[in-house]
Amino acid sequence: EDEGREADTWNRLGAALRVTRRFEEAVDAHGRARHLHVKLRDTHGEAVSRSGLGAALSGGRRFEEAIDALRGSQAAFARMDDVLREANAWNHLGEALREVGRTAEAVDAHQRAQGFFHQLGDTHREARVWDNLGAVLGREERFAEAMEAYERARSMFLGLGDTREAVKADMGVAICLRGLRRTEEALAELGEVVGFFTEERDLHHEGLSRHELGLTWADAGQPAKAIPHLERAVRLLGENNDPFQRDRAAEALASARESLNPAGGSAGPPSP
């Protein structure tokens, strides 16, 4: 009984560490929980631990390991008829599959998750799946379909009164607008997103959205307006445990600086 409580504590710690993007520590915590559940022959607890482990591995960009862990937890939850946790495992699996370019499998995983959440009446989690579907389709440059998925997610989040998640979906819509060469609309949308996250002091999402705004200004042929946003994005993403996105923003910043005409003058202060 004491070891069961210890395992649950490790899993809760792992979940908290994932929220703060301390993924390697989260992997260790969920791994410890799984070891204890295996020792106790608690198959459900082991599946919960494997699901958390998969999410942590994915967050740490260890995608192949994540896929293995998540497939195992999904199959275990299916055997136990734990529909909610199986749906969560499918959704996390779709995210990992997207990152290794297995698009058709990612879409299938998210669609399975969406069906389960719809069946359960869990609108909030279903909306998250639509947001993830938008990301998969956007990665394939299927921007019109991706935008529909993001807009559906946004509508569902707004219906639930979750403004923050709706604004995150707005960022996806803006990325699609940029992909469709609707640059002015993308700039306006991203300006509002940056303003929201700046006001909310959500530093990680401010960094992500400033990165996208900087990319959009650069695509519009205005690197001087891109540079201040990209500079702040590099700093915020570095300070908030997102080295991969920090490096992407740094590459975009270097490219914008290289293309900037020295006669163009100062890039000026960032503006939402």
Image: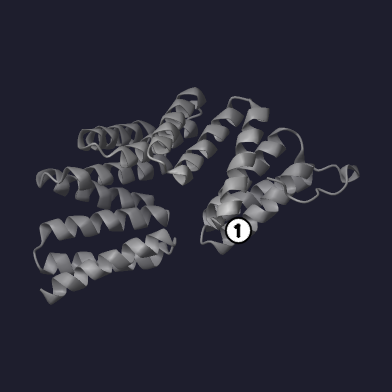
Q: Residue at position x 16%, y 47% from top?
A: 77
Left or right for 164, reference 193: left
Image position, residue 64 (x, y; %): 34, 50
Whether residue 138 is situated above or below residue 78 in the rendered picture: above
Image position, residue 52 (x, y; %): 28, 57
Image position, residue 198 (x, y; %): 60, 52
Q: Dot 1 corresponds to which residue?
A: 236
Q: Residues within 10 Å of mark 1 (few under 14, many from 20)?
A: many
Whether residue 24 is situated above or below residue 52 in the rendered picture: below
Count how many numbered circles sit on residues in the image. 1
Q: Residue at position x 52%, y 32% from top?
A: 173
User: Which residue is situated farthest in the bottom direction here?
Assistant: 2
User: Which residue is situated farthest in the right direction here?
Assistant: 263
Left or right for 131, reference 240: left
Three-letter residue code for mark 1: Leu
Quadrant (top left/top right/bottom left/bottom right) for the C terminus = top right
Q: Residue at position x 63%, y 56% from top?
A: 234
- The image's colour scheme reads one colour
Give the quarter of the image for residue 43: bottom left
Image position, residue 85 (x, y; %): 21, 48
Whether residue 171 is situated above or below residue 242 in the rendered picture: above
Q: Residue at position x 45%, y 34% from top?
A: 154
Q: Which is nearer the eye, 123 or 190?
A: 123
Q: Secondary structure at mark 1?
A: helix
Q: Which is nearer the eye, 14 or 104?
A: 14
Give the quarter of the image for residue 1: bottom left
Q: Please indicate, yes or no, whether residue 188 appears anywhere in the rendered image.
A: yes
